[in-house]
Amino acid sequence: MPVLYHQGGFPPPALDWVHLLPLIGPANAAVARYEGVLHGIPNPNVLLSPLTSQEAVLSSRIEGTQATLGEVLEFEAGGDIDDESTPKKADIREVLNYRAALAEATALLDTLPLSQRLVRLTHARLMQGVRGRSKDPGEYRRIPNWIGPEGCTIEQARFVPCSAEHLPDAMSAWEHYLHDPAPDALVQLAIAHAEFEAIHPFLDGNGRLGRLIVPLFLKAKGLLSRPNFYLSEYLESHRDEYYDRLLAVSRDGDWTGWCGFFLKAIITQAGTNQAKAQAIHALYNQRKDWMVEATRSQYGVRALDWFFSRPIFSATDFFLHVDIPEATAKRILRLVRDNGLLREIRPSSGRRAAVLAFPELLNISEGKDAF
């Protein structure tokens, strides 16, 4: 028998705060330390863009996509981002949409609260032009759905989310909970994420959207100045426990067990994010001095900023969009390639431009020597 949504069980009537208190302080401290690092990074949206792309890759991988960070960025550099001619390319489109949806939601937060309206607009962007585009982007489902092995019946499902008839009321209760006073914002976030996943309000994209809500909530609550927080690395590496803990909320009412898992995820991932952000900032400072020395050009740092924002790119894109005189841009690109800062991963061929990669930056983002 499938586990059914906990109708009437939200918000949780009680939590075991004695169990959670030893995690709440360290989790909040870890987020605060990470925020301190973000404050020290100039233009973090540029410098940390590879981490945002990696978050999109890993959140999508939890749902079964197979694309790597390198494949996503190389595909994007190729220019034909509407190509879904193979399953791999369709996977990559979903990753790119996740990244675009996060950017759009971040902009919306300037004028809208974190709300059902913002969630529906973000979902519409997440599903735009990809495999779920036929599944009512931005619209709550009006039919049942269930979670289990592909092709299973509702009786064979692992979990049956909130029924369509109760869904509008469930989402209204969820939205009100986001803005209610709470003893701790991170516990509130844990509960909000689990409830969103249990409601499963859309026909597709619920997992990715639920994880995307995490950095938006942190920004909306003032815990972070910008939503550059990446949790999917931990959740992807603990995927079985992630799903089991979510399931136990509806099956057993075990909100405390879920919140404990989520707080541990925040502690670990905040530390990982902090280390990566510091490593990227250190690389930028080191390479900024190197660029000035190597290029002897007033445009050297501008070129470096481009490399950080697009760590895999085509030479043509660089020449067209970097806002450097073309002859100078070509000279800089030749210099940094010859001196090993960039590596050519696809040579030019006929009218097709060369594609180059920035291995040092990509390896920090991946957390291993992948390039």
Image (cartoon, helix red, strand yellow):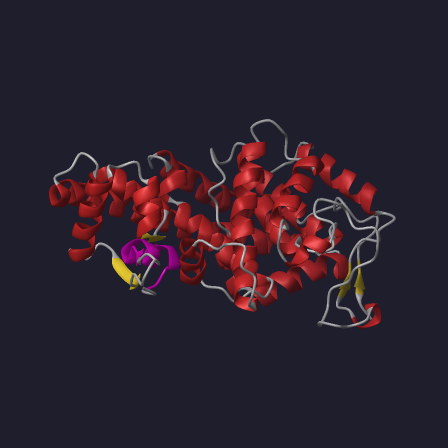
Residue 135 location, x and y as percent?
73, 54
Residue 238, placed above or below residue 170: below
Residue 114, placed above or below residue 145: above
Return the residue found at the far top.
111
Residue drawn at (60%, 61%) of the image: 242
Residue 143 location, x and y as percent?
84, 55
Q: Nearer the viewer, residue 368 or 13?
A: 368
Q: Is residue 192 magenta?
A: no
Residue 11 location, x and y as percent?
75, 44
Q: Which residues are magenta?
A: 355-368
* Image quadrant in which the C terminus is located: bottom left
Q: Is residue 361 magenta?
A: yes
* Image quadrant in which the N terminus is located: bottom right
Return the residue found at the far front.
350
Residue drawn at (39%, 45%) of the image: 48
Q: Nearer the viewer, residue 191 or 22?
A: 191
Q: Nearer the viewer, residue 170 or 133?
A: 133
